[in-house]
Amino acid sequence: MGTTKTEHFTAEQNELATLTKAIAHPARIAIIQHLIKVNSCICGDIVNELPLSQPTVSQHLKELKNAGLIKGSLEGNTICYCLDELGFSKIKEFFTTVDSYLANKNNQCC
Amino acid sequence: MGTTKTEHFTAEQNELATLTKAIAHPARIAIIQHLIKVNSCICGDIVNELPLSQPTVSQHLKELKNAGLIKGSLEGNTICYCLDELGFSKIKEFFTTVDSYLANKNNQCC
DNA sequence: TTTCTATATTGCAATATTACGATATAATAA
DNA sequence: TTATTATATCGTAATATTGCAATATAGAAA
C-alpha cells in the first residue's frame, strides 16, 4: 500500500519518527547549522545561503516549524527564525538512551 | 525535479541526512528500541514483535544496516542483529553541537 | 537426497517527498 | 494610493518510500 502504519506504533515512536524525519534532509540540516551559526535570521538569508529557490526554502522552514524544531516571530515585514529547544529536547532523550546503552559494552554479539 | 540536490550540500550534511532518515520511521525506531532491550536478536524475533510482514521487516533491517546503524552476523541458519556504534556516534556529534548551543541561552530572538 | 526453516529479493501499487514557477498575501516605502 | 519587499501557498512533475505477495536462496534437519 505505501502508507506508514503509524497506528500500530506508540505515540512516542511516531513522534520521534516525525522529528527525525524533519531533520533528515541536507537542506534542513544546513538551515539548522546556519541558525546555530548566526543565532537567528530571516527566510531571505537562508535563500541566499542555500542553492534552492525561495518557495523550496519556505517549504523546508515550514516542515521544521511544524515538527517543533524551529520557531519564527513576525518582525514587521520579515519573519525571524531560530531553533526551538522543545523539539530538540525530545530527540535528545532518545539518543541519550541509545548512547548510554552503547557505552555499556555488553552488546558484543556481532 | 523531485530529487534531493545532494550535490550542493557538504558530505557531512548528506551523511547526517542519510543517518537520520534511516532512523525516521516508527518501525525502525521500534527495531532499535527492541535491540536495546534484548541486546541482540534475529530477524524472526522482530517479525513477531512488529505488525509488519517478514519482507517489510527485512527491508527495514536492510536500510538500518546500509546506514551503519545496525550490523548482522551469520549464525548458521539465522542472522544475529545488534546496534552498530559507528553510525550512532556520527549522529551523536551533531546533536551534541546542537544541545550545547541550546544550553547557552543567547538565542532569544523568538 | 528431500524437507524445513530463516532471510532476502523481486515486482508492483499506493503514497509521500522534493523542487520550483506562478501566484497570493501582507507589511513597508514612496 | 501605488510600488516594493518578504514570505507563503498552489499546482504539478519527478522521484522516493512503504508494504506485501510471490519467489529465491541457503543452511539445518530428516
Image (tube, coloured by chain):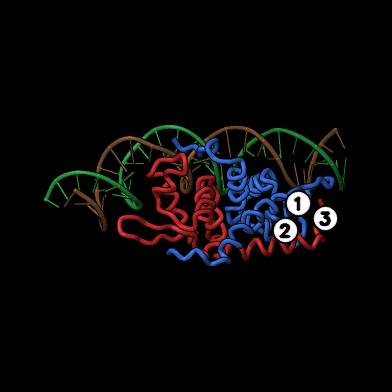
Chain colours: A blue, B red, C green, D brown
Q: CA distance from mark 3 to mark 2?
A: 12 Å
Give the residue pinned by disc 2.
A35
Given residues B12 and A88, the one toward you in this image is: A88
- Give the number of callouts: 3
- The secondary element bearing badge 1 is classed as strand
Given residues A55 and A41, the one toward you in this image is: A41
Q: Is residue B95 left or right of residue B7?
A: right
Given residues D23 and D4, the one toward you in this image is: D23
Given residues A23 and B76, the one toward you in this image is: B76
**Residue B49 seen in this snapshot:** yes
Assess disc 2: are there few (<14), some (14-19) or many (≥20) residues with their C-alpha within 10 Å of its C-alpha: some
Question: Do tags 3 and 1 sit on the same chain?
Answer: no
Q: CA distance from mark 2 to mark 1?
A: 8 Å
If you read the primary sequence from the N terminus, does the residue marked by circle 2 or circle 1 appear first? 2
**Residues at badges 2 and 1 in contact (C-beta under 8 Å)?**
yes
Give the residue pinned by disc 3.
B108
Give the residue pinned by disc 1.
A81
At 53% across and 67% down in the image, what residue appears? A105
**Residue B67 seen in this snapshot:** no
At 58% across and 53% down in the image, what residue appears? A25
What percent of the width, then of the height, locates residue A75?
83, 47
What percent of the width, then of the height, locates residue A110?
42, 64
